[in-house]
Amino acid sequence: MPEPDRDLSRKAIAQALADLADTGHLTLVVVAADGVTAFLLHRDDNGCPRGRSWSATWADLVGERGWDADPAGTREAVVRASRAPSSSGEVILVAVSSGDPKAEQALDWLRAAHPAAQVLRAEPPIAALVREVMADDPLTRSYELVVVLADPGSGRPRLTSRQLFPLGSRPGARTRVAVRCEAAGPYGTAFAVVTWQGPAPRLLSVQSAPLVPGRYEVTAELVRPGRVRFTGLPELSPDPRDWDQLVSALPDRLPGGVGPAHLVCAVEVCGADDQVAERLSRARQVISFASGELGDLLRVSLLAYGAHSYDPSAPELPVRVAAWKTDAGEALDALDALEERGAVAGGYPYHPHAAQLEDMLAVVVERLDWADPTPAVVLTVGGRPPHPARTDPSRLLPCPHRHDWRKLLALLRKRQGTVLGAICDQAADQAHQAWHGIGAAALAPLEAVDVRGLAAALGLVTPSPVHLPFPLLDETE
Amino acid sequence: MQPEPSRGRPDHNISMWGAPGSGKTTLLAALFIALTRRNDDWKIVGSDPASSDYLIDRTNALSRGKVFPEASMTLERYHWTLIGPAPQKTGFWGRKAKPGPPARIGLSMIDAPGGLFGTGRRPAGGVSAPDGAGDPRRQELLDNLERSRGIVFLFDPIREFTFGDAFDHMHAPLTRLAERMLASGEFTDGKLPHHIAVCVTKFDDPRVLETAEKRRLLTVDLDDPYRLPRVDSEDARELFRELCQVSASGNADMVLNALDQFFHPDRIRFFATSSIGFYVDRRTKRFDWDDFQNMVPGEADEDSRIRGQLHPINVVEPMLWLGQRLAAIRPATEIS
């Protein structure tokens, strides 16, 4: 029997809509005293219910010939007006007028044409009921906010999404998310909501606003399927960019400090006093600058190395680890001590033309935590070449410990997220070949160091202002 | 130099000859040390106080101070005598007889900064010597060579690689010497009457050792506890020829040709020489191919130093070869 209850009708329609597959259709045919109205419902690419309706009065259907003049023709016109597919798709027939002969006749014809159709009886207005059901449809896909994360390996930005509303969420649901917004260019920061169907996201909505860089506590509210409202932000406006344009606006590097970093500064402390002082001064500049950019995200290690002794009666000074993975302040204190100490390992029996570079590399290789994904920047400040592992035509005496700088450099290069930079006493074209490996990412001359440029080349900061089109997920949350 | 007392007069004289910086002074100091390490009673003594002082100073510098002896800064003339063991004479019926007089070989070195016959291609800081015909120093060198019948000629392959001036320092005195010998009737067969030991120095340098190794010229004396590599005299000429290929001037091959032109083939012998030898670790006491350089370079204003113990290679051998060859001919009648 037809169900007269409006709530029951709502439930029946809602259930039929909930069962509607992505590619299916639901046809709702409303038969009233004055005519017939067809609602055709489907889901769009994001799973949101969409619908269209067509109405026709009895007069529209039979014209001037009248209802009873050609019953077969009238029947066919009524069935055609229902727009219901004959073979596929669910059909629901809704009778809103009882007792009207034309309406009852039409209902009978439609029931005969769609024997599997549910038949409901409800009070008008049905269109409002359908809109209510559609607006209250639970989500068939998770809604997610597009955010940027720093890749732990490379420190480069990568897109990801953070779930706002899971499957089954209903309007009124709220989610809080903490983000950091950076300078974002003329369109501002885009709050893009996507759904996932397969490997590629589908853009559901995108709104943007120019925001003051900083941290924001944003509340997302599900207004209805396909509509998310963000609060905790200045008013957002529709963003004209499509998905491809938004993605292509993502820079290679993150603005400002790129994230946590471990700066390993190794300074050659043999040679002329003023040159050693200059090297230590450059190390101080880089540490201070990086600290200013990265703050607490920066860990600093400081090593000092000198020259090998080739006389057993004069034991050499080993590589000194003045600080390891400390904060910048402690490292700078250790640098003070090195400056106070000045140049070491001068004169006989210390080798005047090479330094313990290879020993320093061995210490760094041994000390670095290879399981730690934090990017490590190994910055060497010096000028002399390393000793070879064994006698070679360079005539530099071999390292007493047989350390092989080439193998050690290769090991460091293999470590994920490790960047090699150098400040060399000589210009690049005059530096020993080893310095081109030691300063593979950046090789700056001691006498003129562009500290910002060097830090940028080493990935400690970004080289120029960068616009980030999406918010950064605040991982401290 | 003072004339030698007649009783100590050597049987023959040997002159040391080579480009400035070729290592004559170091070779001399190493000679004293090498002789002291031998057990065959050969020794070197000064023929006059100045020469004795010079020998003592340079030897001390090398052995104690581990510094390379200073090169000559002024014209220097030194004379030493190599004194060998006294030969035992057997008496009748096996009775012990009085030992004979020991072999004596005079060793002279005349040197001056910049050499005496160079053309000016020499390290900065030195004085370039003009080839003036009347230069008394050059006359003195020629006098010395004329009186000698043995020559120790030092060829520094590293210097040749850098400056390429070995031929410059050789051909002028050689030509003048031939001129003198011709005038005195001792050039009758078109060859000089001298024996010459050609010492290819700096054998300890990696570039020289590598060249010898690549040419498969190296050998090891099985009796040598350190197993130091050597090049036999028979192969040293090939090493010399190979090293001539990298002469800076491209003239080094003419040195070899000039030697062949002016000396009898059986009076030329090549030696791969090192005054300081190879570094040997005190603990292993074995030559190590990975670590054999025995010299620690100095700062810009400092001299290089010897790193470990001295192991002179082919320093005594050229002298003894010359001594043996000269002893086989009649004693010199005119020696100073």
Image: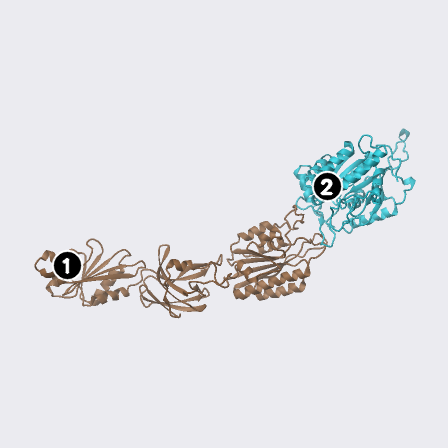
Chain colours: A brown, B cyan
Query: B212 or A24: which is nearer to us?
Result: B212
Q: Is residue A161 left or right of residue A401?
A: left
Residue B123, image x, y percentages: 73, 48
- The amino acid on which the numbered mark 2 sits, given as a three-letter code, is Pro
Quarter assignment of residue B6: top right
Q: CA distance from mark 2 to mark 1?
A: 118 Å
Report the mark closest to the observer, 2 or 1. 1
Q: Is residue A15 left or right of residue A268?
A: left
Q: Secondary structure at mark 1?
A: helix
Q: Which quadrant, please, contains the C terminus of chain B?
A: top right
Q: Quadrant of residue B225?
A: top right
**Tag shown at residue A42:** none
Identify the residue under disc 2. B225
Identify residue for label 1: A78
Residue type at mark 1: give it: Val
Residue A58 shows in this picture? no
Q: Residue at x 88, y 33 (%)?
A: B89
Comparing A39 with A161, the one in front is A39
* Residue at the extreme right of the image, as rendered: B6
Q: Secondary structure at mark 2?
A: loop
Q: Position of residue A232 (x, y in %)?
A: 39, 70
Q: Position of residue B52 (x, y in %)?
A: 85, 47
- What chain is tagged by disc 1? A
